[in-house]
Amino acid sequence: MVFTTADALHVNIEFLPRVPAVTKEQYNGQALVTFSYDDGYMNWYSKALPYHSKYAMPGTFNINGSRIYGDDPHFMKASHVWVADSLGIEIGAHTQDHKALTTLTDEDIIYQVATNIAVLEDLGIPVHTLAASYSDYDERVYSIVSDYFEGVRVYDGVTNQAHNYDRYWLKAKAVKNYTTVEDIQGWIDEAIQERSWLIIMLHNVVDDPIEGCANGADECDELYDTSPQVLEGVMQYINAQGKDTLLPVNTYEGIQLVEAWEQ
């Protein structure tokens, strides 16, 4: 049976099967792949989380602390974040207020990451990794936030390999509103050939993403949208490769598995 977004609206998501943790024994040098979501959108809960459960697919939800107690219905609240964690999704930080860290003072950078961690830890959720808001990142920010996390994800548009690996500068490829399942399959095939770690950066998950920008390129809020159908197609392709060829991991799991790259 095909599991649709409509189905997700008629189940108690908190009772979905938990995504199992990945162990070091499962890693033998094969390619890795990670779904890394930014901004804490409510549609992850109804349109992405059910697929992660269905396909036993790890992932990382990167959450802004201020949004989980705010009034904006577009973002998950504390209870939704707690359920995602309980279902085996890694909860990462994304700064407290979605700030561009390179524009801030050292003190404000510390506030943004330390407060974000504290808000999530108050829910009983351990926080190991950060996805930099806007992928806005430089050596100064690196030197500060590396004291607070075990890994930091940005953008960069390439895979992570032994020769370019830095746990505090993890590279990702971004899904945009014109990115197809076939495009992402190509990224995956490349990672398998390289035995590299592909991190797929996602944002909004909507039923019918438009191609292009409704209000022009300067206000392209839709640029990073994708659909549940793309998610499901990619997850099916990942699982079809077999875990001995391509191992799905969350961000923190991936960092632990490739520790040898740092030696």
Image (cartoon, rainbow, N blue to C red):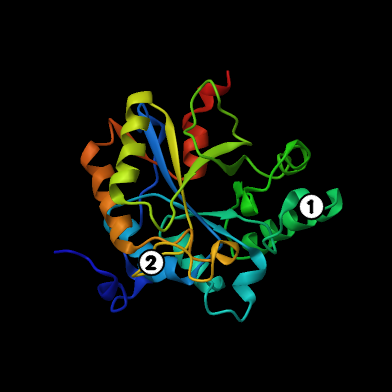
Whole-Å distance between the Cαs marked 1 and 2? 31 Å
- Count neighbours of disc 2 (C-alpha within 10 A) and say few if under 14, some if 14 to 19, many if 20 or more: some
Residue linked to disc 1? 103
Q: Where 70 falls versus 51 (above or below)?
A: below
Image quadrant holding the N terminus, namely bottom left
Residue at horizontal 62%, vertical 36%?
169
Q: Is mark 2 on a helix, strand or loop?
A: loop
Q: Which of 87 and 72 is in front in this view?
A: 72
Residue at horizontal 42%, vertical 55%?
88
- Count neighbours of disc 1 (C-alpha within 10 A) and say few if under 14, some if 14 to 19, many if 20 or more: few
Q: Nearer the viewer, residue 202 or 208?
A: 208
Q: Where 167 falls versus 43 (above or below)?
A: above
Q: Is mark 1 on a helix, strand or loop?
A: helix
Residue at horizontal 28%, vertical 30%?
245
Q: Which of marks 1 and 2 is in front?
A: 2
Residue 145 position within the rendered picture, expressed as x and y whole percent measured from the top left: 72, 44
